[in-house]
Amino acid sequence: MKQPAPTTTAPVAYTRTPILVVFPDSSTTRDTYGGTGENVALEGHHLRPEADSDTVIVFMHPIGGGAYLPMTNALARAGHHVIYCNSRYRGADYALIMEKVAEDLGACIRYAKETLGYQKVVLAGWSGGGSLSVFYQSQAEHPTVTSTPAGEGPDLTKLDLIPADGLMLLAAHVSRHITMTEWMDPSILDEADPTKRDPSLDIYDPNNPEQPPYSEEFVARYREAQIARNRRITAWVKDKLAEVKASDRPNDEFAFVVHGTMADPRWLDPTLDPNDREPGTCYLGDPQTVNMSPVGLARYCSLRGWLSQWSYDDANANGATSAAGVHVPVLVIGNTADDACTPSHTRRLFEGFTNTEAQLREIKGATHYYAGKGQREQLAEAVACISEWMADHGWGEQRAG
């Protein structure tokens, strides 16, 4: 007999077990630290309530780090089986290749089904894991990507990726490359000397006559300049990579720094892409500080990594455009106080699912991480939405152990 859907009203006990997903690595380049170079080893957490289930929720983010986020814990307390698996690039995205991350996610799903014995897998894409999950699912259903933008492996059409049975996006953005471009500081004129700026585009300059709320004309010029800067960097990257490949050491890399990548005018002007976020801050704190700090997005890069994850025109993992290739049920949850993934990203993702049943839910007052005591109500509401959606599709059926 089918048991009632999991609920947050009566938290259940669960165990957290470390898992290791290991598979061969055929790459000709080295882009991760340590290891033998012969295998990829993915570290993960398996959160398992006492009652058995035929379904597991699988999380992966390109750079990982979410195993202890409030959402993963809350889902397990609600009775759901959860895997949080880190990609091979855990905590270090300077050389990240999105196609290899998709390969990692495929290995985790295979492990969940073939080793752990789950019949159903529901992909959970939180934040940057959203576009990854959509990209993965579209390629698992109908693979088309045969190489990275640098012309190298993996060939996703040859990996026999296992499609998930359902997909949910939680506080997700459309892609790493589009998001980073929308956050770039277009006032920087010289990549070798970021102090050389166009003052008319410097939103952190108190003497700039353009102040919030910004005019439509200024925002349009700002957005055009952001894309232009991304394309200038990309052109340089392609030239440099061509030099490397033409040398007698074609598998070498070249590292570089990209300054000023945390300057989205939405953080200063709440009338842009409006929601309930607090103006003057971002998910990393003071945006002016992180704009030039080591923790800013895309601060340290490699040539191949830039093309795969940051290039506005070349990166493959675009959630909004990949969504049309998804044919399994989808749940999209947007958080109305999110200062990282704003409503336009939620809408672009949701509207992209033109070939499947997709539901859109908003959690009023929820922040990006659901962090802190003030977010408990919002977290519980989000978990309830997920539980209801999964129960409607017959996923997460609980059986006595």
Image (tube, rainbow, N blue to C red):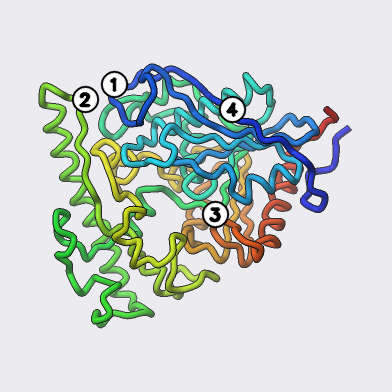
Label 2, label 3: how many angstroms apart (C-alpha)? Answer: 37 Å
Residue under the image location 44 percent in, 64 percent down? 285
Report crowding for label 3: few under 14, some 14 to 19, many 20 or more residues within 10 A (C-alpha): many
299 in relation to 305, above or below: below
Give the residue pinned by disc 4.
19
Q: Quadrant of the N terminus?
A: top right
Residue pictured at 74% horizontal, 38% vertical: 14
**Could you tell me if the residues under marks 2 and 3 are in contact, i.e. CB atoms within 8 Å?**
no
For the residue pair 191 and 265, the one nearer the viewer reads as 191
Q: Which mark is residue 171?
A: 3
Viewed as shown, does residue 382 lie left or right of 240? right
Q: Amino acid at mark 2?
A: Asn
Residue 251 circle label = 2
Residue 28's x, y, as percent?
29, 21
Q: Residue visible at 81% across and 53% down? A: 9
Point out the tag, 4 or 2, that comes first from the N-terminus: 4
Q: CA distance from mark 4 to mark 1?
A: 27 Å
Mark 3 residue type = Ala
The C terminus is located in which quarter? top right
27 displayed left or right of 61: left
